């Protein structure tokens, strides 16, 4: 099976990017991280990527630039690179419909909650404010809604009475670093089957 070509989008430290990169380097993922794309020239993850010899590209949104135009610039850059998969590893901009359609069912995101509960920003605070006993993380395909795409894998994390937003986020992040590389591995092995909103994993 031909290795998949992966583009990783980041905005900050890129800890999920590093977890995926480690799995690639260990041979667990049948793929190559071809490029790291960021909207933030100061993203710490760009330094990590450069240290590992991965090409980096920064796209700052211009003043008054429409979202579709911004992502067209990114799409134009990706053209010719034969990208099989886009991984959103802490990318803080909502994608536009043009890039979503171009890479339909080939864009993965991770969210720090058990979707469909607590979509959007500050998911850990939402969970604490609601008083849930369990939270977690969700890897899903991107669609044109906010965290509404088909769910691939989820991991449950208990919520403690003493939790703050920071402690819950840290405990969820530990699980993110496990399930996100696993989903990328499954995608690169062509084992993810999508039927409407339902996702099935071959051979499981």
Image (cartoon, grey):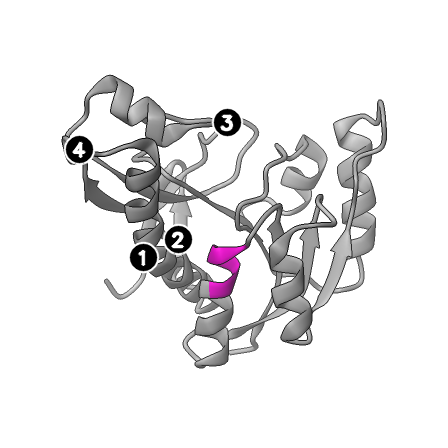
Query: Could you tell me how far apart the alpha carbons at marks 1 and 3 are, in whole angstroms?
Result: 24 Å
Q: In the displayed structure, would residue 7 be above or below residue 108?
A: below
Taking the image as drawn, is residue 137 in sight? yes
Tell me which label, 2 or 1, sits earlier in the chain. Answer: 2
Q: Which residue is mark 2?
A: 193
Tell me which label, 2 or 3, sits earlier in the chain. Answer: 3
Query: Could you tell me how far apart the alpha carbons at marks 4 and 1 are, in whole angstroms?
Result: 36 Å
Residue at x 80% of width, y 40% of height = 72
Q: Which residues are magenta?
A: 14-18
Q: How many marks?
A: 4
Estimate the x, y position of residue 142 in percent, counting from the top left.
52, 39
Residue at x 60% of width, y 58% of height = 45
Q: Which residue is mark 4?
A: 162
- Residue lying farthest top? 130
Estimate the x, y position of residue 197 in percent, counting from the top left.
38, 36
Estimate the x, y position of residue 148 in percent, counting from the top left.
44, 30
Q: Residues within 10 Å of mark 1 (few under 14, many from 20)?
A: some
Mark 2 lies on a secondary structure that is strand
Q: Which residue is mark 1?
A: 201
Query: Could you tell me how far apart the alpha carbons at marks 3 and 4 are, in whole angstroms?
Result: 29 Å
Tell me which label, 4 or 2, sits earlier in the chain. Answer: 4
Q: Tell me, yes or no, whether the two marked residues, 2 and 1, touch with CB atoms within 8 Å.
A: yes
Q: Which residue is mark 3?
A: 146
Closest to the observer: 64 or 30?
A: 64
Identify the image quadrant of the C terminus: bottom left
Mark 3 lies on a secondary structure that is loop
Q: Tell me, yes or no, whether the two marked residues, 4 and 1, touch with CB atoms within 8 Å.
A: no
Residue at x 63% of width, y 39% of height = 100
């Amino acid at each position: 099976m031909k290795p998949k070509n992966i583009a990783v989008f980041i905005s900050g430290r890129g800890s999920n990017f590093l977890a995926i990169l480690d799995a690639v380097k260990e041979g667990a993922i049948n793929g190559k991280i071809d490029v790291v794309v960021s909207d933030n020239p100061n993203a710490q993850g760009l330094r990590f990527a450069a240290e590992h010899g991965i090409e980096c590209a920064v796209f700052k949104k211009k003043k008054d630039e429409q979202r579709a135009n911004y992502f067209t610039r990114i799409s134009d850059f990706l053209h010719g690179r034969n990208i099989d998969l886009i991984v959103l590893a802490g990318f803080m901009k909502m994608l536009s419909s043009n890039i979503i359609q171009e890479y339909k069912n080939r864009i993965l995101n991770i969210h720090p909650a058990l979707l469909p509960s607590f979509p959007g920003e500050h998911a850990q605070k939402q969970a604490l404010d609601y008083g849930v006993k369990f939270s977690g993380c969700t890897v899903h395909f991107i669609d044109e809604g906010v965290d509404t795409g088909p769910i691939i894998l989820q991991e449950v994390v208990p919520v403690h009475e003493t939790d703050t937003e920071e402690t819950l986020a840290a405990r969820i992040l530990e699980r993110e670093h496990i399930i996100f590389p696993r989903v990328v591995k499954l995608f690169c092995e062509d084992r993810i089957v999508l039927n409407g909103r339902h996702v099935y994993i071959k051979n499981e």
